[in-house]
Amino acid sequence: MNSNVLQTPIDYLKGVGPNRADLLRQELGIHTYQDFINLFPNRYIDKTRYFKINELQRNSSEVQVIGKIVHLKMVQQKRGKRLVATFTDGTGEMELVWFRGHKWIKESLKLNTPYVIFGKTNWFNGVFSMPHPEMELLKEHEQSLRTAMQPVYPSTEKLTNKGITNRVINKLMQQLFVEVRTQFYETLPPTILDELKLISKSKALFNIHFPKSQELLAKAQYRLKFEELFYIQVQLIIKNLIHKSKIKGFPFDQVGEKFNDFYTNHLPFELTNAQKRVIKEIRNDLGSNAQMNRLLQGDVGSGKTIVALMSMLLAIDNDFQACIMAPTEILAIQHYNGIMELVAPLGLNIKLLTGSTKTKERRVIHEMLQEGSLHILIGTHAILEDKVQFQNLGLAIIDEQHRFGVAQRAKLWRKNTVPPHILVMTATPIPRTLAMSLYGDLDVSVIDELPPGRKAVKTVHRYDSNRLKVFKFLRDEIAKGRQVYVVYPLIQESEQLDYKDLMDGYESIAREFPMPEYQISIVHGKMKPADKDFEMNRFIKGETHIMVATTVIEVGVNVPNASVMIIESAERFGLSQLHQLRGRVGRGAEQSYCILMTSHKLSSDGKTRLETMVQTSDGFEIAEVDLKLRGPGNIMGTQQSGVLNLKIADIVKDNDILKTARYYAQKILKSDSSLALPEHKAVRYTYAQLVKHKNIWNYIS
Ligand code: ADP
Ligand code: MG
């Protein structure tokens, strides 16, 4: 099939016309024949079975029956009338009922003529009835293209109200197949079709709309899901390739003085194997001629900072500047202090730039940056301001990348005439499944190993009724010199209520842990920043034993002496938040604990979340469960990508197909990056079509 035909506006399809075309455009985004063909059914009704009336069950769902109408009458009722037909198939009688459209139905119904009816049945006073059945003359039923598996298309209320019912869509789809003569251009290369035993595009499209059997439907679904995921991967990989060939980076070809000095003389600990591997991956990137664009994933506490630092040393060794940008001031300060301490012996010029940096200091920083005497700039969004100009920025690192938008990342790019190498780091584990689709165009490094000696945080779930025991446990821990967090949820809509919970909680804790023996900090969103910092610092310095807080402590705080994290109303937190909070403890040498407090009332999802937390501390595993519970729409970073616009594949359920698709896309592009080989003609053509018709999504970077 010549693909031009598929670009025909939907208005031209027989039976559509301008009104229906408008509706299809508005409600379903269908502009062309192609769009319409890609309107895949949500589900199928199995019409393989014909029921006899005497087989009907009181609670059977939708059924299909063959029979005749033998009698038709109007029945007056309190409000309006109903039209009732007596329908029989020789085994029994049932009623067909209409509450609306009487005139039209009465005129069109044929008595004593075989019909196939379909619908839900009700049972009342010993009689089965079917309101507003779907009806088709048996003769037509036998001839029509419709098949045993009846597709149910996505629709909207407006469409149904305007008469574009599922049935109409079905009819239009038949018409479309007639017009295009059911021949579709094959989009996959013969090798893939062979190896995976996929059915052809034509056969797949036909059977997705008019499945001849369950088996063919399954094959059609597999083939179309594969194709969809395959072309996402092709697009991502090509984007990555183009990026690498077009965008020359600065080759950092020297591993020089600073890096080596630090590595041999000042490394405070032995790097984990994962850290070594990741540093090697980054070094390879930086040493090549292409600009690096790498995502570094590593759970809380896995040691990303040192990796970031050593990458920056590589930049400095090659006479470039580096910067690191964090989402909050607290985090930026922590990076600054940590890095200053690590590289103190190297004699580097490092500065901190945040919203609270004084004008005078700012001016100094701007100057040092431009004359090139500043080696490393650490800061918040403030780095993005136009006034901040580097002499030669070679590497930009973004911490907790999901907190920054695409535009902000793009801004970093333009800090130089040649874009700097970019390393984005995240502790929010992105499920592998999703990462492949979201970040398929970034190179990904993973630190999947915690530094040695870390004891896993012991996590338990306790009911509110056990609170006294929990308090006793806290007293014991505090007696050993440990500190404790108690965290309350704060969710926007119920802010007042949450605030009250927090204050009530604080009071009861203050009663249990009276002054002067015990000191308590409290931190919440309604406090002035200065007060917050004051309280936070008291806790960091060990002057207070207990920190009562809302989730403001989620990012940033690092208190290795804190060994207990109590999360109140834990069922109200999402999995990734629970995981982040738990990451606040277990940072020191002591055994740490996370106690999830809830009432007895738990939803099944809530239970799953708590069980997951108790069972595992692997951030990736937790992220996978989160993805299954919430769907991809709510996972960080998906909103801006195309994964939600998938037409047939499901990023969670079709994980295996995704992997296969990625494997084949990589294989093809590795051997033939410009898709020039004759056997890749179909891929080249289809890819070009996707680009042309704007199906290329706007991925990050
Ligand atoms: P994150 O990945 O969460 O940013 P950090 O880089 O802050 O983690 O590291 C967490 C803690 O672990 C820091 O105190 C750091 O000094 C320490 N650390 C990092 N790598 C190692 C290692 N290989 N051996 C021992 N401690 C390490
Ligand atoms: Mg960090």
Image: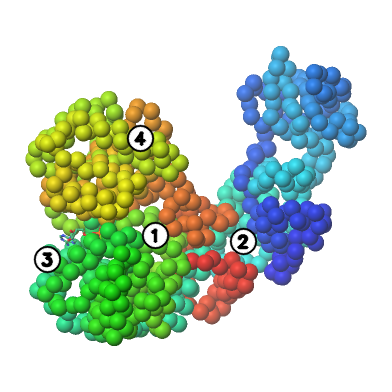
Among numbered discs 3 and 2, the one appearing first in the sequence: 2
Which residue is depicted at the point 74% across and 53% down?
23
Q: Earlier in the sequence, mark 4 or mark 3?
A: 3
Residue 455, how many percent across, how many down? 16, 48
Ligand 1 near label 3 (Cβ, under 8 Å)?
yes
Q: Is residue 145 left or right of residue 342?
A: right
Question: On the image, numbered disc 4 is attached to which residue?
Answer: 500
Q: Nearer the viewer, mark 4 or mark 2?
A: 4
Disc nearest the viewer among 1 and 4: 4
Q: Quadrant of residue 89?
A: top right
Q: Which residue is mark 1?
A: 402
Q: Earlier in the sequence, mark 1 or mark 3?
A: 3
Q: Position of residue 649 (x, y in %)?
A: 53, 54
In percent of the image, x 30 and y 77: which residue is there? Answer: 363
* Amino acid type indicated by mark 4: Lys
* Amino acid type of the residue tagged 1 in the rendering: His
Question: As rendered, which of 382 and 690 lies closer to the eye?
Answer: 382
In this rendering, the answer to whether 584 lies above or below 244 is above
- Tell me the distance, in whole angstroms, between the alpha carbons under discs 4 and 2: 62 Å
Q: What crowding class fits label 1: few (fewer than 14 Cα within 10 Å), some (14-19), or many (20 or more)? A: some
* Residue placed most toward the observer, 448 or 129: 448
User: Residue under circle 3?
Assistant: 268
